[in-house]
Amino acid sequence: MSTFDLIRLLPADHFSTALRHDVQHGLTSEPKWLPPKWFYDARGSELFEEITRLPEYYPTRAERAILTARADEVAAVTRARTLVELGSGSSEKTRLLLSALRGLGTLDSYVPVDVSESALAAAGEALAADYPGLSVHAVLADFTARLALPPDGGPRLVAFLGGTLGNLLPAERAAFLRGLRATLDRGDFLLLGTDLVKDPDVLVAAYDDAAGVTAEFNRNVLNVLNRELAADFDPEAFAHVARWDAEHEWIEMRLRSLRTQTVKIPALDLPVHFEKDEELRTEVSAKFRRERVAEELAAAGLRLAHWWTDDEGRFGLSLARPI
């Protein structure tokens, strides 16, 4: 019989406190910025699901193709009893790994970790129903701030998919990987998805689609601030910008003010002034080369053991283990 339980590691006021901190800090900085995690309210999550189906947005399809081809190999190498997924969301791609581990006969439990309790509950209950005998131990946590893995159930396979590592700035990535390494035992593994450096035109198109879905997704963060902090942003007064930064090898998403304006955020007693054409950075999405993935893993105490890409070399999936 399958089981499902939810462990809450976030205080009840975590969302409100974190949002207020990020907005206060980011919108009083020069240049202004917001972290991308605030994209994902209910509407933002719907828009992102739509983005993953767009012809320009290849990462989801490319990563799924690798997992389809390599899940059995990942299972055979790791022989994991516990699959831990960071930022699990809907856990759609996870099913490929769960099925491979189940087919091998090693799988006992699945541990999805996410900041969305509703996503954890929906995905966890569905998986418990679809995989008889599977124990699902969902963890409500912000894995970039506090990472806690179950101490037993090894060997464990920790999956961090979707290229989400690239949303962290270099210092944040280093701290995250060091923290993750500290939680891993000798027999554990990390399965990491990273989008790869490629033609800038292909990259920009993936973040600035012809249908304008990504533009709506980007501006939706202003709706989040309006709803949660009583701000008076006019989303239509900002243009979506996606730009390739060749020096840092990352895509930046920004919102450009179309006019001189001052936005009021009453919940913070904060007026925010924008000059015409001033930009607010809302996301960094780093792109990687195999060498940099290996270097960053090694700096955190992890050894790159296996490396796979899709047929077109657009996306990388790496399997690493503690040194």
Image (cartoon, rainbow, N blue to C red):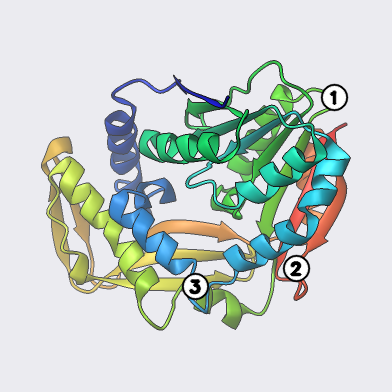
Q: Secondary structure at mark 1?
A: loop
Q: Residue at x 34, y 27 (%)?
A: 14
Q: Position of residue 265 (x, y in %)?
A: 15, 45
Tell me the mark number nearer the camera, choosing from 3 and 1. Answer: 1
Measured in 3D between alpha carbons, the distance from the residue under mark 2 to the one under mark 3, in whole angstroms, is 25 Å
- 308 on left or right of 249: right
Whether residue 30 is visible to the viewer of this picture, yes or no, is: no
Mark 2 vs mark 3, foreground winner is: 2
| Amino acid type shown at disc 1 | Arg
Query: What's the amino acid at mark 3?
Result: Arg
Labelled disc at residue 310: 2
Quadrant of residue 32 within the rendered picture: bottom left
Front-lying residue, 51 or 74: 74
Q: Quadrant of the C terminus?
A: top right
* Residue under pointer 3: 243
Instruction: Give residue 286's quadrant in the image.
Output: bottom right
Q: Is residue 209 rendered to the left or right of residue 78? A: left
Element carrying mark 3: strand
Taking the spot 40% from the left edge, 57% from the top edge, the residue there is 282
Q: Residue furthest top?
A: 151
Amino acid beneath label 2: Asp
Q: Count neighbours of disc 1 (C-alpha within 10 A) and say few if under 14, some if 14 to 19, many if 20 or more.
A: few
x then y, percent, for residue 174: 67, 39
Give how far across and how far down residue 41 sits, in percent: 31, 48
Sequence-wise first label, 2 or 3: 3
Q: Which residue is mark 1?
A: 186
Judge by depth and name the residue closer to the eye, 268 or 308: 308
